Every structure is written in structure tokens, then in C-alpha cells.
Image (cartoon, rainbow, N blue to C red):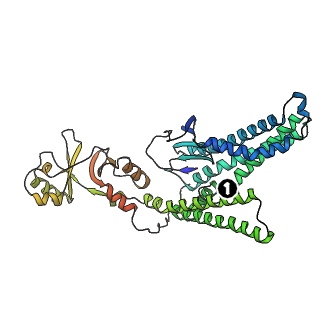
Amino acid sequence: MEERSGTRGGGSRPSGGFVVGRVAGAPVVVDAWWPFGALALAAVYVPTATRVAHPLDGLAAVSLPTGAVVALMTVAFVVLLLGSVALHEVAHALVARGHGHAVRSVTLTAWGGRTTYDPRGTTPRSHLLTALAGPAVNVALALALGGLAAALGTTATTAGGFVVVQVFLAGAGANGVVAVVNLVPALPYDGGAALEAVVWRLTRDRATATRVAAASGYGIAVAIVAVLVAWWLLARSSPPPPVLVWGLVLAVLVWHGAGRAAASAVPAARVATLDPAKLVRPVTVVAPDATIDDALSTLLADGVRAVVVPDALGRPIAWADGAALAERREGHVLEVATALAPAAPVDASLTGLDLFDAVRAVADAPVIVAVRHGRVVGLIVVAEVVAALRAPSRRTPRSDRPQDN
């Protein structure tokens, strides 16, 4: 699960991969590396399938060789597990959509999946429920498959029935593992997002919540390595190769995810505090044929430091700074004005993430016109927005207002 701001409409196709369907208004994309993940799962399960298939003699009556049984079991397991991962991501998407978020994409990758959605309007409650939806599906699938295996196990009298039971048991165990791993309280795992939501609700400060979830990730990564080292020291032998490899892989992934989360906390906090009162330069509008002297008089009367010049249809086409006009003193405003790049105006009442998205959508223009109720009220200099986002870090003030959830 991943929040991602943006100006694209819900359902925009992300780059890379193949679109195989739609859910919650968004494309379901199979990443180009997804087949390698399927092959890796098959390689992991083949030894188990082989151990189950070899002792079975009941299938000889239908002339089904052991290799074919292993292949069928492996394919069934891979399809079952990858289907479970897909349902995990679909659950994220549906709950996010149910809370009013535009879902951007549902992507199935070699390592699992990723659901991206627009975070505007997110509350601690919606963040928590969206995060837990995926693992909840895996828990339900683990219980359902385990229950089916138990029910069939008491009645299965053929080798074929025994094989089905074993596949269901493997699917139940795999879903349990997926649920447990995803509930690790470290970003970007679902458990980390849940921890972030709880801390956000308690502190009313999302940046602090993100930092706490990131710190938890660092601690868990260190703890995993410490357990592996303690195992080696106390048992006087290294852990089994699969445990060692997967433990180290998980530690690296958790550490990397914690680093990304920590790095995103400060920019996210700065975006949330973007204030048009600090970024919009007040202007006044003068006629296209206005003289510099007229413009200077208007600037003085209105108490602003820049003017905007519209065309015959009222569309802003140029702007001029008061200092530049004062240096010239004579002539017409358009002789010293700077042309405005064609770009949609930005609503001067927008704040935080909405203001950031609106500016980013037209960021190719160095200066953007700000309007309020259709009237030009100011200019936004993109370089000043960038500077505000790169300003030295400050602690986000805690709100005394109750958090809406």
C-alpha cells in the first residue's frame, strides 16, 4: 500500500507492465518482473511437492507420473498464492476507494504487490483501515484454506484427495506467512502503516508518526540480525541456509523501507504546511496599453509590488515587478513586462498538498498566476515554492484541534 499524490485522474495507467484488468476504477498491472517471482515461488515449493508426490502409488492407476504430480501441485500452489496476493492488493484498493481516495493503480510485482492512491483527505482511521485490509484478507484465506484442508483430510481416501489437501495446507501456511510479514510494524509494510496511523491519532502529527514507524523499522531490522547472530553463538552452528537467507533479505528490506520512510517524513510535513499567504505575491491588474507611470501609481494606491497585464480577452499574458517599472519610468508596461508561460491559473485558496499538486501540474512555468473566484490576485514563483520545501527542518507544531477521523 502506498500513498502517492498527483494530478492524474484515477485509473491512469502507470508506466511499465501489462494492464490485465481494473478494480476500484484503477488499472491492475502485472509488473514485467512478475514472472520471475512466480518462478521463484515454484522453485521454493517443488521440494515440498516432491516429498508429497513420491510416496503416492494410488495415482499409478491413472498413469500419472510423479513428475506430472509435482508439476500440477506446484502450479496449483503458485496460482493459489499469487491469487491471494492479488486479493490482498484489491482489498487495499477497495477500502481506499470506500474512504473517498482516487486509486491510481494496483500493481503485482515479483515481490508481492503495491496499491497507490491519492492521500488527500486521509485520516488516521482511514489510513489504519486501508492498511489492515490486505493482511485481513490473508488471515481469512489462511483460515478458509486450513478449514478446507481439515474437512477434506477426514474424507479423502484417494491419492488425488491427499494431494489437494496438501496444496490447501501449503496455501494456508503461505497466506499466514504473508499476513505476518505484512504486519511487521515497519514502513512500507502494512503493519508500519497501521503503527503510523495509531501514532498519528495519538500525536495529531503525521510527520512524527512516520518517523516513529521508520524508527521501528530500523529496530526490527537490527533485531532480526541480532537473532541470527545469537542463534549462531548459542547453538554453535549457523542457522539453516533458508532461514539465514530469508532473515537477511527481510532485514535488508525492512532497513531500506525504514530509510525511505524517514526521508519522506520531512518533505511530507513541509508540503502539508504550504501556505498561500506566504507564497502568493499580491498583484494588481493594469490594462495592456497602460503606461509605466500609470502602473506605478496603481501599485502605490493598491499597496502591491507587481502588476499583471491581460490580453483583450482578459487572460493574463505578462507581469512586471515594481522595481523594474521604477527603473524605466517611461514608456508602456508591456515594454518591460515579462511574458507569462501558458499555464492554467492556480486557486489562491488552496493549501498544503492541494496547493503543491496544483503548482506541480504547471511547474514548467517559472511564474504562475493565482486567482480567487476567477479574479487575478497574485503570482506564485515556482522557485519560491521549491525553496519553501527545501528550507531547514523544523518540528511540525502539534495541533490542539481534535483530529477528524
**Which quadrant of the structure image shows residue 128?**
bottom right
Q: Is residue 168 visible?
A: yes
In the displayed structure image, the side of residue 380 where residue 118 appears, left or right: right
Residue at 13 percent of width and 57 percent of height: 296
| Residue 67 locus on image (x, y percent) | 81, 36
- Give the residue number, with chain letter if any, for mark 1: 183
Viewer-nearest residue: 123 or 137: 137
Q: Secondary structure at mark 1?
A: loop
* Quadrant in the picture for the C terminus: bottom right
In the displayed structure image, the side of residue 170 where residue 128 appears, left or right: left
**Which quadrant of the structure image shows residue 37?**
top right
In the displayed structure image, the side of residue 325 where residue 225 appears, left or right: right
Residue lying furthest bottom? 233
The amino acid type found where label 1 is placed reads: Leu
| Residue 2 locus on image (x, y percent) | 55, 50
Q: Is residue 24 visible?
A: no
Viewer-nearest residue: 307 or 330: 330
| Residue 365 locus on image (x, y percent) | 30, 49
| Residue 110 locus on image (x, y percent) | 62, 46
Residue at 20 percent of width and 60 percent of height: 303
Tell me if mark 1 has few (under 14), some (14-19) or many (20+) residues whose alpha carbon lies within 10 angstroms of its own.
Answer: many
Residue lying furthest top? 62
Viewer-nearest residue: 3 or 233: 233
Residue at 17 percent of width and 58 percent of height: 322
Residue at 39 percent of width and 65 percent of height: 391
